[in-house]
Amino acid sequence: MNRLSTESSPYLRQHAGDPIDWYPWCDEAFAEARARDVPVLVSVGYSSCHWCHVMAAETFADRAVGDSLRVGFVAIKVDREELPEVDAVLMEALVALTGRGGWPMTMILDPERRPFWGGTYYDRAAFVGLLDAVSRVWLERRSEVQANADTILEALRSSVVEPLDTVPGPELINVALSQLAQGFDGVNGGFGKAPKFANPMGLDLVMRAHMITPSQGTTDVITTSLDAMASGGIHDLIGGGFSRYSTDERWLVPHFEKMLYDQAMMIGLYRRGWSLFGHQTWRAVVEDTISHLLTTFRHPNGALCSSIDADSLDPRGQVAEGAYYTWTPDEFRSVLGSEADRMIEWYGITDEGHLDSRSVPNRLHARGDLLRPAGVEEARQQLLAARGRRPAPSIDDKVILEWNALSISALADAGMVMARPEWIEAAVEIADFLIGEMRDAQDRWLRVWHVDGEPRARHRAAATDLAALVDAFTRLGEATGRAHWTELAVRTADDLLDHHWDAGEGGLITTASDAPEPLIERKDVRDDTTPSANSLAAGALLRLSAIVSEPRYANHADRILQLIGAAVSRTPTAVSHGLAVLETRHRGITEVVIPGDERDLVATAMRVWRPDVVLAWGERTTADIWDGRENGLAYVCQNRTCSTPVDNSRDLLAQLTGRPVNLDASLPDA
C-alpha cells in the first residue's frame, strides 16, 4: 500500500494498492522532486470517471510503469473534486498545450509546480513511451523545458479578464442567445454535436428570453430540448436522475456516471420549464429526479454523496460501462412475464441493443410521452426492484460543500414552487449536516467531508463553495420564513467577500487570501457544468442584498457583472448564468414581504416563478425591508416603490403577474 491509503478521498484510495509511489498533492512531493532534480507527474481524475478506471487497470497497475515513475519522477494523484483549483489550473494548461482537455488528465510539472507537458488517457505502451520521452528531454534539453513552462504560464496569465468600467447593458444577452440559436439542434434538441451535454444554463437563458418576449423560436428550443433529454437514455427512466452526458446526438446512449451537481441543475431546469409551460411531464421529471437524489445519493449521515460510477459487473461477471442500467428483451421477460412485450415496446428495448447488444430504456420513439399509466408504473417498479438485485455501481460517498449547497437550492426552490414541504425539510436536513460537520475550529468552511477521513472534513472551501452556500441559505430563508437561514447567508457572504474579494480589480479569487499561494491566481468566470464562482455569487449577492437591505452586496454583484461582461466577447455562451444574473439586474429585484404566517399569501408568492422576485415572510429581521409592514398583508415593491398592500391571493397574484387573473387557472397544478 502507498501513501494514498491514509487519504479520505475514495478516488485516491482506489489507487492505494497501485505499484506506484503516489503522493497526494502536497508540499512534500515537490520538495522531494527538488531534492532529486526530477519532474513531477500529476494524474488527475475522479471516482466515477470511466476512462480513469480504464487507465488505472491498463497502466497504473503495471509494475514496470511503477518502476519507471519511481526512478525518473515524483508521482502525484489528485481528486479533481477535492481540489478544483488545482484541476482548473492544470486543465487550462492542458488546453493551452493541446487545444483540448478531459479526464483522466496527465500533466508533467517541474519542481516549482510549472506545467510543461500534458495529455489525457494513455494506455500502458503510450504511457511508458511518454515517460521515456519526458525523461530524455528533462536530462538533455532542460532549457526547452523551462521555455515551454514559461510559455504556458504566460498563456495562463494572458487569459485573465480585465473588467469593464460599468455594468454592461442587456444587449450582451442577445449575443449569447444568437450563438445558442446557431448551435441549436432542431431535430434532437440541445446544442452542438456529440458528445452532448445538457447545458441547463444555456436553456435557462433561453427561458429568460421567452419570459420577456414569448416566441415560437424560444418555445421550440425549450420544448424540443427538454422533451428529448427526458425521453433519452441520458435520463434514467427506471430509477430517475440524469447521467453526465450523451455519447450521441439523440441523447440515447449516455456516459452512465451520475454526478450530484447534474441532478441539482436538472431539477432546477425542469422545474422552471414546468413553471413556464405547465407540462406535467416535466413536473414528473422533477419528482423522479428528487426521489432518486434523496434515496440513492443520500448519505446515511444526512448529506448527499458526490457521484455514482458508470461501471459495474455485467451478467458475465466482467466490469462494463452501463451494465447496471441496460437490458435485453429476455431480461424484461424474466421480470415482467406476460406484460413484457408491452413494456419492451414502451421502453424501446430491441434485440440489437444500443450498447454491447444491450438496450438503454428510452422513449425517443414517443418523445415527450413520459407520464406512466398505472400498468407501466407497476412494471417500472418491478424492473427497478430487479435492477436493485444486480451488482450496483460504486458510489463516491464523499460530501462536497458546493454540490450539496446547489442541491439545497434546488430542493428549496422546487419545494416552494411545487408545494412540496418534504423537499424543503430535506434541504434543511442537508444544511444542518453541513453546518455541524464542515466547519473548522475557526468557523471557516471546509470543502470535503468523508466518514473515514481523519479529520473527516478537510481542504479550505473555495469561492464557489461559499457562493453556492450564500444562495442555499438565502433560499432556505425564503422557503421556511426563518431568520436563522438569512443570518447564515449574511455571515457566509461576509466570509466570501473578506477572504476572496479582489479589492483592486473586483471579482472573486478562487482561493482564499490566507490559503497557500496558488500557481496562478484565478478568477472563476466561465460557467461550465456548474455556474462559475463569480456568476453564482453575483446572483446570490443581488438577491441577498434585497432581502437584508444591504447595498454593499448589490455593489459587489455589479462589479462582478463588469468582470463577466468583459468575458462575453471571448465566449458568450460560457457565461450563460452570469448573463441570466445580468438580466435580473436590469429587470430589478421585486421584493415580496408577508409578515407573519399568512399561509395563503405565502403559498401564492411561492408558486409564482419570477427570477427577479425575493420573498421575506415569517420571522422579522432588522432589515429595512420590514419597516412599516403589518401582519395580514402582502407588500410587493421594486426600486423602493410599492404597490398597494393586499390581503388576498387573487390581488397578490395580479400584482406579481401584472394582469388580472382567474385564480384557479393562473398557475400550473401543484
Image (spheres, rainbow, N blue to C red):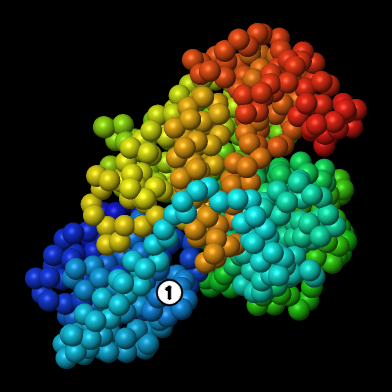
As drawn, 604 above or below 61: above
Does residue 466 appear to the left or right of 345 in the view shown?
A: left
Residue most extreme to the front: 165
Can you give x and y, in whole percent of width and height, for residue 517 in the image?
Answer: 23, 54
Can you give x and y, in whole percent of width and height, for residue 474 in the image?
Answer: 53, 31
As drawn, 54 above or below 210: below
Does residue 87 appear to the left or right of 243 in the view shown?
A: left
As drawn, 662 above or below 65: above
Tell me which corner region of the image, top left, top right, bottom left or bottom right, holds residue 646. Answer: top right
Please report the residue visible at 33 percent of the width from the left and 48 percent of the height from the top.
504
Does residue 644 appear to the left or right of 622 in the view shown?
A: right
Please report the residue visible at 51 percent of the width from the left and 31 percent of the height from the top.
545
Can you give x and y, in whole percent of width and height, for residue 316 in the image?
Answer: 58, 73
Query: For this rendering, which residue is in front, 110 or 301?
Result: 110
How many discs appear?
A: 1
As drawn, 469 above or below 188: above
Query: For this rendering, which residue is in front, 127 or 186?
Result: 186
Circle 1 — which element?
helix
Can you give x and y, in whole percent of width and height, for residue 254 in the image?
Answer: 64, 67
Please report the residue visible at 26 percent of the width from the left and 76 percent of the height from the top.
149
Tell me which corner region of the image, top left, top right, bottom left or bottom right, holds residue 620. Answer: top right
Residue type at tag 1:
Val
Tell me which corner region of the image, top left, top right, bottom left or bottom right, holds residue 401. Answer: top left
Report crowding for label 1: few under 14, some 14 to 19, many 20 or more residues within 10 A (C-alpha): some
The quarter of the image holding the C terminus is top right
Query: For this rendering, which residue is in front, 316 or 278?
Result: 278
The quarter of the image holding the N terminus is bottom left
Does residue 567 appear to the left or right of 182 in the view shown?
A: left
Would you say residue 334 is visible in this rendering? Answer: no
Residue most extreme to the left: 35
Would you say residue 69 is visible in this rendering? Answer: yes
Tell me the residue that label 1 is attached to. 95
